[in-house]
Amino acid sequence: MTYLAKPRLHHPTLACNAIGFTRRDYEGKISTLCAGCGHDSISAAIIQACWELDIEPHRVAKLSGIGCSSKTPDYFLGQAHGFNTVHGRMPSVLTGANLANRELIYLGVSGDGDSASIGIGQFVHAIRRGVNMTYIVENNGVYGLTKGQFSATADQGSVSKKGVVNADSPLDMVTMALQLGATYVGRGFSGDKKQLVPLIKGALNHRGAAFLDVISPCVAFNNHAGSTRSYDWVREHNAAVNRLDVMPARAQIVADYAPGDTIDVEQHDGGVLRLHKLDAAWDPRDRIAALNLVQQRQARGELVTGLLFVDPQARDLHGHLGTVQQPLNTLSERELCPGTTALAKINTALR
Amino acid sequence: MTPAVSPLRAVNDFVVKFANVNGSGSASANELFAKAILRMGVPVSPRNIFPSNIQGLPTWYEVRVTERGWLGRRGGVDLMVAMNPQTWDADIAEIEPGGYLFHDGSKPLPKSKFRDDITVIAVPLTELCNAAWEDPRQRQLFKNIMYVGALSALLDMDVATLEALVAEQYRGKEKLLPPNLKALHLGRDWALQNLACPIGLTVRRADAVGDRIFVEGNAAAALGCVYGGATVCAWYPITPSSSLAEAFQKYCQKYRVDEAGNARFAILQAEDEIASIGMVVGAGWNGARAFTATSGPGISLMNEFIGLAYFAEIPATIINVQRGGPSTGMPTRTQQSDVLACAYASHGDTRHVLLFPEDPHECFAFSAAALDLADRLQTPVFVMTDLDIGMNQRLCAPFEWGESRRYDRGKVMTAGDLESGREFARYKDVDGDGIPWRTWPGTHPDKGAYFTRGTSRNPQAQYSERGPDYVYNMERLLKKFDNAKSLVPQPVIVQSGPPARHGVIFYGSTSPAMAEAIELLAGQGIALDTLRVRAYPFPDTVRDFIEAHARVFVVEQNRDGQLRTLLVNEFDMDPARLVAVLHYDGTPITARFIAGAIADALAQSAAAAKTAQMENVA
């Protein structure tokens, strides 16, 4: 939430994308988060991803819950409608919004308190249903706005700023998303924009439930020695399994890598996800292998990052429900009301 | 057995109660019985009295046969069809003196199991069934239709009507028709040959049904949502509302599938009521008409979202099929006990629009109206029905819809409006009615976007913690709510004749019992004007009505007099003017109860007045 509007002046030499927008056109209000907050880097990555994908900002609907991360939709895509809902309940509101108009792009932003504690049920069920959305959890292991309590994703044994040791087992949202049937699952780090921007682009292009767990250190409450979500700790333990290029449909694909180093995954819209493998044994189209990889590396104290799983032919909730192509919010009496003749028949049948 | 009291005699005016075991297949036979009487032109009012159970526990079906058209529960039983040994003693005790007991006489019962002031009718149903069928399931099922056959003889019902109804029931499943007809006639023929038919209670063909329809309130509300243009339904199963969402699904399959087989609707069974209202709020924010159906416990869970929808001004339609509370309460019994919980739902200062349908006809009309009102007022609107209306078939006026009727989508600015340079400020009162304009997401590339939030903001939808911004908004919400008074269904006032000294206010499913009670009281020389509240906020006519009467009885089906509290609070009224008449044991309120309570109260106050007068004289 900010009191300050950003100046709208653009530098004349700023680059435009294919629809004539500069990166500034994808910005929102000035962030009121702490200087150095990982969440601001994620907002910047969202801005970059939308600009690179030539998305019209107003065709995005931004939804969030409550918390530091949930404030961020105000800080990007100022021409898009946003909805700061209630704590932990963004997924249901996004689901309803998506049912109303299937043509917009749905971006849900949440945090680990919002999605792993109070809202875990809604996270679970929105993923299960295959809602066509990009669901980003900005994961810092603490409650920032209420000043540093552990969240459910904090590692067992990690130490809070006040010196308390966390005794509870952590929830791993990537593992959960994989088990729940998410059809695009990745993990990023707010400190690695090069990796994060393509992960977001791939998610925005994906038709189905795309989930991104983005480790995002809290500079105020979880960036100290003993924390397993500090910038230093994450940099030391980050195990990136791939690099991703997101290529639009009909783009000329140039093979400039040795065969075996990359995997191309064609998306439903004809676009291609090109994965540069950093781990040779890795295939992101195998859900069970992804689960194994995450667990094995976690046991070694590593945080796996990259695109972990994708099902390019996924169906979404509208596919399951068989809804019409035309957005439901545009249907009128003509399509919706059965009329007086039908009602007369109904009355007759009830006598 | 010859009864010690002369047997009851009545034509088209008696109560039959079926005592069954849940899951024994009795429901369709009982409904057949009720519908046959209806087809003979005699109004009936049936009620399911059922446990929170799928199989094995007792269940009852009570049919009031009433040529006068009194559709409220009467109380008392004239003919008990006792098919459940578990509840035998209580069932026998419930029969009116001079009444009748119908039972399966296959096994002899000791004399102590009966009463000497009733007529006992024994039909060997099990014996007859066992002789006719081999399969144990069939033996059980056909016993039900067999007792309907026997009753048709005993009550002098038209057998051709019954046959026609059975044929309708098994249309498309013709293989099942002959055995059902056989069972019907086995029962009927046995009764005709072995018993004195008819008994003192008989059904005589009449013309008292007219063009009325016979339907459950939940189905009617669902159809109202189809006609009203709801495209998104999110719900979580809860008695007694589940059949509403299921009926919506059924009607949508029939009326909302396009030529290519695609659905012009989306129904989601959510993971809980919090998610179902969240989905409704999300869909409403994004311009679709959305509703949820629930009951008391669901309302409790939805509270936070209801506050968000009120404050962020998002249309949402919530159909509350009320049951007995608090907590799990009486999930299969009826009450009107969520009035305050809905009127003031959520933390902070809130007020919500409530509509109170009296029967399925109004369930249809008010559900469609709620969708319009929610869009017009940009706020949650509750349709406050209950189990008695929702889960029982009720005779009511046919559904109506104007061919030229258009949906009122409220104040929505289009891309064209924005392009033409019209000012957009999401929370500004530009028209003086407290209702601001809104835009749907995705409307325009660079105009009309705003950030929706549950926190305070200024009229331009920018986050603000300034006191004046907050107060402006809260005052505007109040103005909007006040404005709703003229948009909601207006109260129905019935004058008894010359202005009566006392009045009655009632609402919802109390309606049929109230009409009958007024007649009972008139018979005792007590004249009362009545006002049926159909919505909150209360139009000023409600205040005028109260002020025009010395005292007003407020008849409700809850313990605490919730509507009375709301009236006192909203009109800042002397509570002594409003006398609570409360029925809340989970059974539908009866005319006998209302008339008794009001007559007693008036007698007491007359006696008190007399005492006071005598003391003055002394």
Image (spheres, coloured by chain):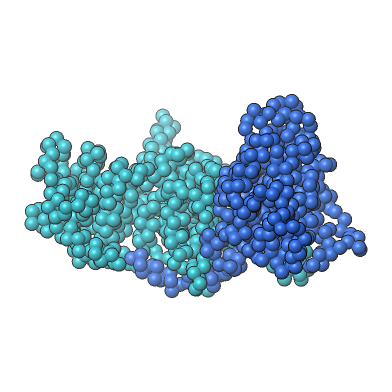
Chain colours: A blue, B cyan
The reply, left or right, for residue B263 in relation to residue A118 is left
Asked if A6 appears above or below A330 in the picture, the reply is: above
User: For the image shown, how many numbered marks are present on the structure?
Assistant: 0
Residue visible at 58% across and 68% down?
A: A325
- Please say if A347 is above or below B290: below
For image coordinates 46% across by 60% down, the residue present is: B249
Residue B224 at least partly seen: yes
Q: Position of residue A57 (x, y in %)?
A: 75, 61
Tell me if residue B233 comes above or below residue B160 in the rendering.
Answer: above
Residue at the extreme right: A12
Q: Nearer the viewer, residue B321 or A110?
A: A110
Q: Residue at x 76, y 71 (%)?
A: B420
The residue most toward the left is B193
Relative to A348, is B135 on the left or the right? Answer: left
Q: Is residue B143 left or right of residue B525?
A: left
Report the side of A152 relative to B43 (left or right): right
Q: Please state the horizontal and vertical placement of residue B321, each as a whole percent of the image.
A: 46, 50
The one nearer the camera, A346 or B581, is A346
Tell me: residue A131, above or below residue B95: below
Q: Residue at x 30, y 67 (%)?
A: B172
Residue B386 in the image, given as x and y percentages of width and height? 43, 50
Q: Quadrant of the C terminus of chain A?
A: bottom left
Q: Is residue B582 visible?
A: no
Percent position of residue A88, x then y:
63, 44
